[in-house]
Image (cartoon, rainbow, N blue to C red):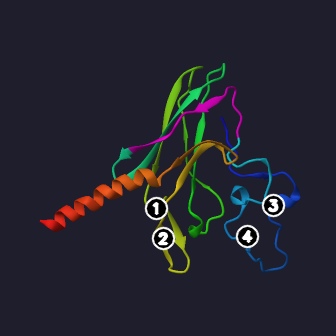
Amino acid sequence: TGRLPLMLPATEGDSIPPGEGKTVAYTERMETSYRSTSFKAAYPFGHGLAYTRFEYLDPSVVGCGVDLCVEVRVRNVGRAPGRAVAQLYLDFPMGAGLPAPFLKGFQRTAVLLPRRTGVVTFRLTDRDLSYYNSVLGTFEKVSAATALIGESSADIRQRLPLMEARNDLWVDFLDLIIFICAL
């Protein structure tokens, strides 16, 4: 199963016009390709074809050391064997200044026979959960994020709020610090 590494626009108006002259103003900032909410796609970023169909079951957060891992089970619901390429996009709060969810990882399943299920795991580091603050000149970790998992940027099958999972870890950490300070 191949996947498009770019978004193919539906019309000429659904793309950024080329600059004229020697100076190009990048007024679109991060709103390019699949991250632009104003562009329509003939074929979205990550689009691909397969000989079968896949169902994405409820994702969950699983332990993987200091990182945050998202695990999702993928079931072949078609009639032919095939591989899915699951894609994970992160949606940050508006304060991060990012226009739309953006790709943070993709994982291919093993070949799944009809009615069989495979598991894919996405490892998210602190850097994955951060954005660049141009005012401060540093990366800042977000306080909330949502994982969007699907077949392409336009075909999201599951959503998983990540802050709820991180809050439990954070509360445990704060409890440990309070305990240590009380000694």
Q: Dot 4, crowdedness within 10 Å: few (<14), some or many (≥20)?
A: few
Identity, as a three-letter code, of the amino acid under mark 2: Phe
Q: Which mark is residue 15?
A: 3
44 is higher (above) or lower (below) than 84:
below
* Picture quadrant where residue 24 is located: bottom right
For the residues labelled 3 and 2, the Cα–Cα distance comes to 29 Å
Tell which circle, 4 or 1, labels the residue nearer the N-terminal end: 4
Tell which circle, 4 or 3, labels the residue nearer the N-terminal end: 3
Q: Dot 1, crowdedness within 10 Å: few (<14), some or many (≥20)?
A: few
Q: Nearer the viewer, residue 104 or 143?
A: 143
Identity, as a three-letter code, of the amino acid under mark 4: Glu
From the image, which quarter does the C terminus lie in?
A: bottom left
Q: Residue at x 52, y 36 (%)?
A: 58
Give the image location of residue 179, x and y in percent: 19, 62
Marks 1 & 2, CB-CB < 8 Å contact: yes
Q: Residue at x 43, y 56 (%)?
A: 125
Give the image location of residue 55, x and y in percent: 61, 31
The magenta-colored residue range is 48-62
For the residues labelled 4 and 3, the Cα–Cα distance comes to 11 Å
Horizontal relation, residue 140 to residue 91: left or right: left
Q: Is residue 50 magenta?
A: yes
Q: Which mark is residue 127?
A: 1
Q: Is residue 79 magenta?
A: no
Pick out the residue farthest to the left.
183
| Secondary structure of the residue carrying numbered label 2 | strand
Tell which circle, 2 or 4, labels the residue nearer the N-terminal end: 4
Tell which circle, 1 or 2, labels the residue nearer the N-terminal end: 1
For the residues labelled 1 and 2, the Cα–Cα distance comes to 8 Å
Tell which circle, 3 or 2, labels the residue nearer the N-terminal end: 3
Q: Which residue is mark 4?
A: 28
Q: Dot 2, crowdedness within 10 Å: few (<14), some or many (≥20)?
A: some
Q: Which residue is mark 2?
A: 139
